[in-house]
Image (cartoon, helix red, strand yellow):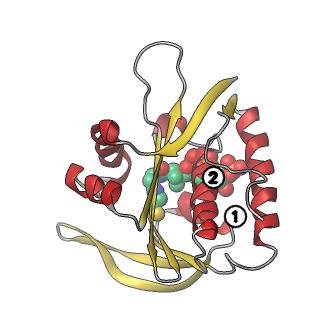
Amino acid sequence: MNFLALTPLTADRLPQAVALDRQCLGGLWTLEGYQRELDSPNSDLLVLLPQCKRGAQPLVGIACLWAILEEAHITVLAIDPQYQRQGLGQAMLCALLTSAHLRGLEWATLEVRISNVGAIALYQKFGFQEVGKRRNYYQEGDQSEDALILWRKGLQHPEFPQTLRGWEETISQQLRRSGWQLAVGSGLAIGQHD
Ligand SMILES: CC(C)(COP(=O)(O)OP(=O)(O)OC[C@H]1O[C@@H](n2cnc3c(N)ncnc32)[C@H](O)[C@@H]1OP(=O)(O)O)[C@@H](O)C(=O)NCCC(=O)NCCS
């Protein structure tokens, strides 16, 4: 079993965060952009770090939300392609939703490329629903692509902590099947939210 830490990004790992962003998101934010998120009390910026016995720890996942009034705006979610389809994206999304709940936020929202069927399937698993489209939201040269706007309501519903616990159990099982275990004190705060 390999241990994983799900933990806030720290300044010493900013270059790794930028490298993963370039690899997975085509360079959404610069190092200064990530530094701004680190400095902002309204941002939760989480990373996933496999706990290797020797050598440098790779950074294999990154996720971020902005707390804006009652809203959690999910701005970043990315897993290193070599580590995808093992449950790590779900673990990070669940950690963001847990954090949004604990901050007292009412709903979560995000934009996703209309062609990004994998990410859309992931968000749907967690109760996100399509509420609209932003035409030509993504622009690359003379190419453009629409964004779907997804919405997850009910983060302060009395049953939401129970929902979180159910997800955490399912995710822990899937991670175990993939040979992963979250290190004690890591992100998924099972039993810590009521
Ligand atoms: C989207 C992303 C974060 C998913 O990470 P991941 O670790 O592979 O996701 P998980 O293993 O936790 O998958 C959870 C579920 O999401 C869905 N899913 C994820 N990737 C999928 C794919 N390529 N095709 C279809 N469904 C997919 C499945 O329902 C999957 O459950 P399953 O494996 O039991 O079928 C990852 O593919 C990624 O980093 N993509 C590039 C960046 C990106 O597009 N981010 C989203 C921006 S809005």
Is residue 76 in view from this perspective? no
Q: Residue at x 57, y 66 (%)?
A: 120
The residue wearing badge 1 is 125
Q: Quadrant of residue 1?
A: top right
Q: Say which mark, if any, is on residue 137.
A: none
- The spot of residue 59 in percent (x, y) is 43, 35
Q: Nearer the viewer, residue 182 or 149?
A: 182
Give the CA separation, mark 1 to mark 2. 9 Å
Q: Tell me if the residue at label 1 has its CB under 8 Å from ligand 1.
A: yes
| Horizontal arrangement in the rendering, residue 89 relative to residue 76 (left or right) | right
- The spot of residue 73 in percent (x, y) is 46, 73
| Horizontal arrangement in the rendering, residue 188 relative to residue 100 (left or right) | right
Name the amino acid, label 2.
Answer: Gln
Q: Are circles 1 and 2 on residues that touch, CB within 8 Å?
A: yes
Q: Say which mark, if any, is on residue 90.
A: 2
Q: Residue at x 75, y 34 (%)?
A: 176
Q: Tell me if the residue at label 2 has its CB under 8 Å from ligand 1.
A: yes
